[in-house]
Image: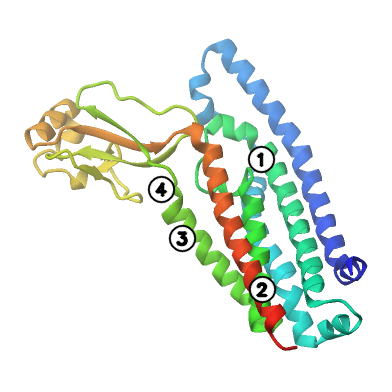
């Protein structure tokens, strides 16, 4: 059965291996150059005692290459569409599954071997891509304190493996339920994208309770250290309520709070006299500033939590596939 799976999918393996080899060669060559550039810049700024401005003065890698690395976020979805979607759907659509069953291969073994190998391949491929991206991005992570930021979090560490296993399991389950290859591929894209957006944008920040720093006006503001993830910031209101700013608000702001949302009497002072502006805010009942964030030290905890979520969903989808295939009439 393993030999049959290899014969059926070896072309996909060859294409994936070739693409990975090209990608690895590109990242290894450019990654070594970027690492050397970063070390040289660090040595130079250390000698001149100007490393505090390094992040604003140094650009690592070309924009095109950075875009290519960012686009690896779609790798798990592609694996789900092109490896998971057709795996069972094509067999049921063409009826070739019955040929295997008539040769003495049970449905259970047929499904276990096909699903097991494709999940293993997806985990290995996604893990290799993620390892390359994590290594390549390490100078930029150190320079910009970025690896906990949405967008970078999704393409580094172990979470891409969870995404890939979920995507492939989703494609397999969709194929088993729909029994048509193209519709199964379309459903995989839609459901994968939807869940990734919901979990990434709405749930991720709540895996662990955020740390909140509150400082009164005039006090020296404490700043989180390392690659922390800023959740929200704003003003402390009259009753101690935290008044956070809209995340996409543009224009003049104080600690992230748009001046347009402050009392009308305090707005002109934002540019004219910031000290009087703080006094004005105090007179209107505002108590100080706050910052809510996820500390840099929680990075791997968040990676593990999110990977676990997707692994659980993948396991449930494989269970659904098994129930459908083992109980449905051929």
Give the label on residue 321, or none.
2
Query: Residue 79: x percent and y percent?
Result: 71, 63
Mark 1 surroundings within 10 Å by alpha-carbon count, few (fewer than 14), some (14 through 19), many (20 or more)? many
Query: Residue 193: x percent and y percent?
Result: 55, 65
Identify which residue is drawn at 72% across, 36% down. Answer: 31
**Who comes first in sequence, dot 4 or dot 3?**
3
Residue designated by label 4: 206
Mark 4 or 3, closer to the camera: 4
Mark 2 or 1, closer to the camera: 2
Vertical placement of residue 148 versus 87, above or below: above
Identify which residue is drawn at 35% across, 51% down. Answer: 248
Residue designated by label 3: 198
**The C terminus, quarter of image:** bottom right
**Who comes first in sequence, dot 2 or dot 4?**
4
Residue designated by label 1: 134
**Who comes first in sequence, dot 1 or dot 3?**
1
């Amino acid at each position: 059965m393993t030999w049959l799976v290899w014969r059926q999918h070896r072309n996909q393996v060859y294409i994936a291996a070739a693409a990975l080899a090209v990608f690895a060669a590109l990242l290894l060559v450019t990654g070594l150059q970027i690492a050397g550039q970063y070390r040289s810049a660090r040595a130079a700024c250390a000698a001149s005692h100007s490393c505090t401005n390094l992040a604003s003065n140094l650009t690592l890698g070309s924009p095109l290459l950075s875009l290519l690395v960012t686009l690896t976020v779609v790798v798990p979805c592609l694996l789900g569409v092109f490896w998971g979607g057709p795996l069972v759907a094509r067999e049921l659509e063409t009826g070739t599954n019955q040929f295997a069953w008539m040769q003495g291969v049970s449905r259970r073994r047929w499904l276990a071997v096909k699903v097991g190998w494709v999940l293993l391949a997806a985990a290995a491929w996604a893990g290799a891509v993620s390892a390359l991206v994590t290594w390549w991005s390490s100078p930029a992570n150190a320079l910009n304190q970025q690896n906990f930021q949405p967008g970078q979090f999704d393409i580094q560490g172990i979470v891409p493996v969870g995404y890939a296993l979920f995507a492939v399991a989703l494609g397999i389950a969709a194929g088993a339920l729909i029994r048509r290859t193209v519709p199964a591929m379309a459903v995989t894209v839609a459901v994968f994208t939807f869940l990734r957006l919901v979990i990434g944008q709405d749930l991720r920040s709540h895996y662990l309770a955020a740390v909140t720093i509150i400082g009164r006006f005039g006090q020296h503001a404490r700043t989180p250290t390392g690659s922390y993830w800023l959740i929200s910031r704003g003003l402390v209101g009259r009753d101690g309520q935290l008044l956070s700013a809209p995340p996409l608000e543009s224009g003049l702001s104080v600690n992230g709070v748009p001046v347009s949302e402050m009392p009308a009497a305090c707005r002109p002072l934002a540019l004219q006299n910031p000290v009087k502006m703080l006094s004005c805010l105090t007179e209107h009942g505002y108590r100080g500033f706050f910052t809510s964030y996820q500390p840099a030290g929680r990075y791997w905890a968040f990676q593990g939590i999110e990977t676990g979520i997707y692994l659980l969903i993948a396991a449930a989808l494989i269970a659904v596939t098994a129930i459908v295939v083992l109980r449905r009439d051929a």
